[in-house]
Amino acid sequence: MTDYDEQVRKIVSLKRYETPRDGYFEDFLSEFQQRRRRELSQKSSTALFLERLATWFREIGSIKWVAGAGVAYAAVMVAILMWPAGPGTVPDSNRAPASFEGGQAPLIPAEETTEDAPELKF
């Protein structure tokens, strides 16, 4: 055996006979709580809020939030697509698609095709 191993063996054998002071285990909880309160009093309120918020989210579980967000998104999309256009609105069924080709006369909507409509010449 080496000298190092012998020293370790002596230290371990001496540690067997060491015992904590009387009342150590009874005082441990109160000392721990006092130390924790002191640490918390040194932190800012924003840091405490963010720490508690992160802990709350960690305990809930992420799959519930993903599923909830997906359902909320689907509900919003259904509401947008099913929302009525408003009273008295009708789709423009008598309009022709726009044409951007040169040389063609513009289309006149059906309401203006009376005899009073000006004649277009090109």
Image (tube, rainbow, N blue to C red):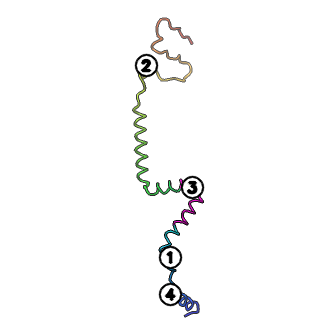
Q: Which residue occupies the foreground of this view, 10 or 86?
A: 10
What is the residue that sits farthest to the front in this orientation? 22
* Alpha carbons under labels 2 and 4: distance apart: 101 Å
Q: Is residue 91 magenta?
A: no
Mark 3 or mark 2: name the one nearer the start of the chain: 3
Residue where numbered disc 1 is placed: 24
Q: Which residue occupies the foreground of this view, 74 or 8?
A: 8
The type of residue carrying mark 2 is Asn
Pointers 1 and 2 in contact (CB under 8 A)? no
Q: Magenta stretch?
A: 33-50
Numbered disc in front, either 1 or 2: 1
Image point (40%, 37%), residue name: 78
Residue where numbered disc 4 is placed: 17
Q: Main secondary structure of the magenta part?
A: helix
Residue where numbered disc 2 is placed: 94
Would you say 23 lies left or right of 4 here?
A: left
On-image quarter of the N terminus? bottom right
Would you place residue 81 above or below residue 60 in this image? above
